[in-house]
Structure formats: structure tokens, C-alpha cells
Image: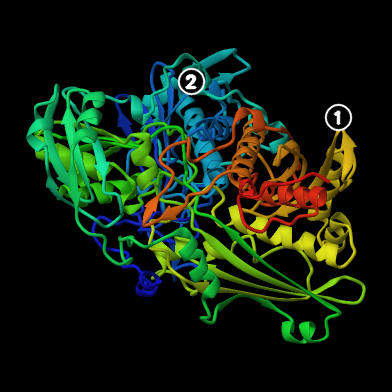
Amino acid sequence: MRHLQRHRRRRAAGRGLRSPPMHPLLPGPAPSRRSFLTAAGGALVLGAVLPTRLARAGAQGPAEGAGALAPKPGTRVAAFLEIHPDGTIKLLSPFVEGGQGIATGMAQIVGEELDVPPARFVVECAAPGPDYAVVNGIRMTGGSFSTRSSYDTMRRLGATARDLMIRAAARLKVQDGELTTRDGVVLHAATNRALPYGELAADALKLKPNESVPLRDPKTFRYIRRPVPRLDVRDKATGRAVYAIDQRVEGMLHAAVQHAPRLGTEPTRLANEAEVKAMPGVHSIHRLPGAVAVAADSWWRARKAVEALTVEWSAAKPSGIDTVAADFSSDGMLAALKASTEPGHVAEAEGDVAAAFATAAKVVEADYEAPYLAHAQLEPPSSIARFNGDGSLDVWLPNQMPEVFQAISAKVADVPPTQVRIHSPMLGGFFGRHFAYEAGNPFPQAILLAKATGRPVKVLWSREEEFARDAVRPLSFSRFRAALDAAGQPTALAVRTVGEGPIGRYFGMMMQTPVDPSAVEGIVGKPYAVPNRRMTFTKVAHPVNIAFWRSVGHSMNDAFYESFLDEVAGAGGQDPFTLRMALLGGSARHRTLLTTVAEMSGGWRRGPYESEGGMRARGLAMASPFGSETATIAEVSVEGGEARVHNLWIAFDPGSIVNPAIVAAQVESAAALGLSSVLFEQIVYRDGVRQSQNYDTYPVLRRAHMPKVHVRIVESGAPMGGVGEPGLPGVPPAILNAVAALTGRRIRALPIANTRLTGA
């Protein structure tokens, strides 16, 4: 394990082309304060106001004097409305659409206050700029934060624009208060006169926006909280939707790459370069950091050529910054996590844990572990780079943070950021894949190749290259101990988590605590009233490139915690549902979710029980991710030694919602990914190399394994929580608990596919 010992030091966050992915809990660059109303091609462009100083991620509190500088509530959202003379309404959104429905949601929110049907909106992702920093002072589409971070301000944006339209209709010469609006038209009911918004845009440009405008009474909502059809459905159904993989620019070359077998090694010699250069369509051959590339007149020719290259690579170095040793393995990494004896930092503490264990009637202990996971999104990564005659650079690339990618692109190209234009297409899924993960992105390769060839270049990774270089969810390990009293009630809980999370990896220098929140979320902050608790975190760094993954630390930690809670219930002779209800006695919100999910499933019963000619059982789990709350019940059987899930019931409380159809779809898709991860998925390293190269060696959920998913939205009225990720964390533990109830076997090492099961 020499390579792990050498890697204990913190990675240098600014080395090479590295730029960290951002997280909603952390601060970003301070934008300038702007409030403007300008013309763009005859359109009304309504910009929001930004404060001169950011709140310092909440942890440090507001900046001194920020209250006096901050604008009125609702004026911080950096978005633009374009209302054209022909009546076209375009929303330049701070967020990237990637299947989560944010474009439709933004149109609903703005359209509600602007009084325009959402179907009339054209929504585009705005270009980089300081006006779009809406998530704790940064611009990011992720963390299940888009809608909840912008709901109030987007409403204010629509209301302010509507107010401008009404004031611009002064030509009707009526008394204040006599004008109203409907579907993009200013109306004077008494005289039956009407002026479309498009005809008022020019006059509205001359008006100063009001800093305080009334918002609609939610009782009058026409679009918010309604299942408004998605704006992108027709384009997706007819093949008109344009993803990064579909994009082309005039005169571009196509490039394919062959990466080094191990991260940190470089090409040293091309044994057959002349032969490959003579292959049909080949334009040129290039050496890149950690890779070789071929540019050609088609991607297929480029791929065939690059795969034909015989490349000699430098020897693998010991694991360290940006390097993976030849002897590195996931088994060895897990052993290092388990063997760590370094004292942990306290992540959560309450009561006297030592005393509770000293007087316990029974002590329960268990170790839980989860593997590395790939994002494995359907769309393989691609990027286009083009240098222009004026020295500027255009980059087309899938991303979740346009400004961050603009800064990295400028550094790679050696041009000022103001000379870089980032084009953000619709994403073929998020999953945390589209942040800037060092060698995990193709856009630096496209920029270097465009500079070398003098032509626009599109780089597309094959599926094999994607699996080779995708940044992965960290392998994780946690050790649990619980103290029980004579009645079987838990009196203390102690958890030791060892490993590394993406926030600590990329933002360690900015954190106010040595505890990585992305490594312990789902273990700390649980709602159960266990009187004595101590959770610690010990950092052991991974040499591999780690990443955010849908629901981040919750994706494995809730599986650990909720599974162990079932173990505690069993050790105390209690039913898991009854124990949870007792531990949630002080939380009506969580008890409501539990009773709701039990009612959805026809009443709680653990089993085993007979159903449809076989034996089944049920498992229960709760999770509190991203400001939302969930309760999940899974029903499973065992068929052919494998777990088969038949039903998932999910009660979901995000506080309040915008579009119930989108919310339900997001919960269902998150449940599918959670199901896939717990049943099948894992990335295995041997000899420093990932063993999975495609979906044949990285199995994911297939249609035959998809259960019925029943979702019920419970609006508690709590502050709006996230939607995209919270449906996932409760699914793995519910399935694990159902498998234990059915087979009597507790699986503590994921995925379930590694264990051959037998029925009850």
C-alpha cells in the first residue's frame, strides 16, 4: 500500500488544467452589481440586480454592510427576458436543461407573474456572465438547487416585467389601476382595448423598473403547481432536439482519442505513425496530455485510425496527484480505508456516547462499504472548439457551470476569458457528470487540437474511452456501533466514516471544517431521536479521479444508515416501522411520510409473505437529502439467486412544488438509478486499470428489472427542497432491508449482484 501512503497529502487544487466543480454550499466568484434595461434587436431585455458582495456561503454569514447594498428581495436572479415586437418571448435561463425539466419550470414561474402561458416561451441557456450567479453567488445547474434557489426571484422577474408592460400602456390614457393583463396582452376592460406586450416593448425600454412589485396570490395561480407539458417534448419526440453529440460547425475536423491505460502516464513513442497517417481521411496525428488523438474527415475514420496506433506509454508512477500506480486496486483501497487508525474529526456529537455504551444492555456493530461508480450516461462526452480570426474562441460543450468552463478554456487556449464564448447545449442527462473533472472532460483536447490544426475540431470519446476516463463516485466505508437498552431501544449511535468526498477533494482549502460534508451527508443530520450520537470522519484520499454522482454522499450513506437501523431494530426485537415511528415522535413531518408510504403500499407488512406464487418481503427507509424528505418501501423477491424488485412506493415531501408531473418523473428516474446502483453497478480497479470498458462489463438496470414505481407528493409547506436527486437515497436501503427480511441475510457490501441469494 505504498502508493496510498504517498497519496495522503492533500491534492493541489490549482495544478495543471484542474478547475474544481462547484457545490451549492460553497462560495464562488463575486459578481458585479448590475441593474439595467437595454434594447437588443428591438426587444425588451430585463436584467436582474446582483449584489456587490456575496454572502459567504452562509457559513461565514453575510458580508459586512451587505444588507445596505443588497437589492430588494427577488432582484438577485440573473436572468433575462426578451419580449420581441412580434410577441416572441425568450427567457435566457441561468440553468442548463438536461432532462430535468428546468426550462419548463422556469417558464411556469416567470410566466405566472408575467401573465404569459408557458408554452409561448422559448428558453435558452444564457451565455457566461456575472449576471447568472444565482446559487449562493455562483452559477451552477446541480445539487437539486435550481428551482428552489431561484423561485422567488424568478417570480419577481416576471412581476417586474408585467409591471413595465402596464406602465408602458399609458398611451391608453386611463386611470391607474384600470389596466390588467391576460396571456401577454395589456387590457382595458371598460373600453375593450388591448395592447400586446410586443407592441409595448419599445416604450417599456424607457421606463425604470420598480424595485418592489406585488406578486400574485398563490390561490390565483394558473401555471405554478400545475402539470404543464414540457416545452421540449415535441423536439425530443421528433428528433429535432440538439445535443452536444449532434452539433457541427462549418469546416470542422473530427477527432478520436486513445487514452493512456493508467492516469498519469504519457505517450512516449508512436511505432506506426506513418502507416496510420496514410489511412483514408486522416488529417493529422497528435500527442495530448495522457492521450493520443487522430483528426480526420469523419469520426469513424478518426476512431479506426487512433485505435490502429501502436503507442508506447511512460511507466506508471506511484499513486499521487493525478497518477494511479500500477499496483493500485479497489480491493487495496478498501483495505486501506478499513485499516486506517487516524483519529477522525467530529462530524456530529450529542449527549454522552461513552456512558451510553458503558451501560448498554446490548451493542450492535456492522461495517458497510460501497464501490466506485461510473456515471455511465447514455450520451458519450463530446466538445467542439473553434478559433476565430479575431483571436476569440468558441467552445461547444455539455456543462453544468458555463463560467467555470469559460475560465478553464481560456487557460488552455492562453486567451483572456472575455475572448471565450461557451455554448451550452441540452444535456443527455446530468448525474453530476458535467462538471470540470481534470482529465475527465474532452474539451481541453478539442481546444488543443483546434490550435494545432488551425481548424475547428470536434472531439468525441468512444464508449470505451468514456469508461476509461470518467470521474467516479468515491469508494466508501463506514463502521457503525449502536447501544441498546433493556427494552431494545437505541440509546447511542457511533459512526466512523473513512474516505474522501468531492467537496473535500476540490474545496478543502475553502472549507471551514476538516469534515467533508459530501462524505458524511446521509449519516449526519438524521431526524431520529437517538439521544447520544457521535459521528466522525477520517480522510483517506483516493488517487483516482472522483466526482459528484446523483445524490452524492446520500447515494451510499443513507443505504448504510437505514440498513443499520433495521439491524438495530432486529437486535432489539422491534419492527423497523414501529422503531422509526417511535424515534420520530418529535417530527410530525416525518411521521406523516411514514404513514403515507405505508398507506400507499396497502399497509406496512415486512414479510416474508406469499404473493403471485412466490415469496416476497418489504423493506423501509427514509432519507433527508437536499432539503426534501422521503419515505420508501420496496417489495422484493429472489429469482435465480438474484434480487428482483416488484414495487417501489415513495412518499416525497419537497415542501412545495412547481410542476407535479416533472416532480413525479424526477423521483421515478432517481429511483431507477438508485435501483441500478444497489443491484448491479461497480467500477473495479486491478493493476491500476479499470476493468469495465463498456456496458457489457458495467451492467446497469435493464427494462426487465424495472419495477412499478408509485409516487405520492406530500406538500408539507416547508421551505422548497430539491427534486432531481432526493428520490434516489431511500431506494437502496429499502431494497437491502427487504432482501434481509426475505432471506435473513444482511448485505453490507454493495452491489447486491456480488452476493448469490436464496429465498426465504
- Which residue lies at the image location 83% right of the left edge and 63% below the top edge? 569
- Which residue lies at the image location 82% right of the left edge and 51% below the top edge? 741
Q: Amino acid at mark 1?
A: Glu
> Which colour style is shown?
rainbow
Judging depth in this view, the residue of 429 and 591 nearest the camera is: 429
Q: Secondary structure at mark 1?
A: loop
Q: Residue 460: x and y, percent?
A: 29, 33
Q: Amino acid at mark 2?
A: Lys
Q: Which mark is first along the chain, 1 or 2?
A: 2
In this rendering, the answer to whether 653 lies above or below 567 is above
Q: Local crowd at mark 1 within 10 Å, few (<14), some, or many (≥20)?
A: few
Residue at numbered disc 1: 612
Q: Splitting the image into 4 quarters, where does residue 649 fall?
A: top right
In this rendering, the answer to whether 478 lies above or below 466 is below
Q: Residue 626: x and y, percent?
A: 60, 53
Q: Is residue 57 visible?
A: no
Q: Is residue 467 left or right of residue 304?
A: right
Give the total number of marks visible in the rendering. 2
Residue at numbered disc 2: 236
Q: Local crowd at mark 2 within 10 Å, few (<14), some, or many (≥20)?
A: few
Q: Secondary structure at mark 2?
A: helix
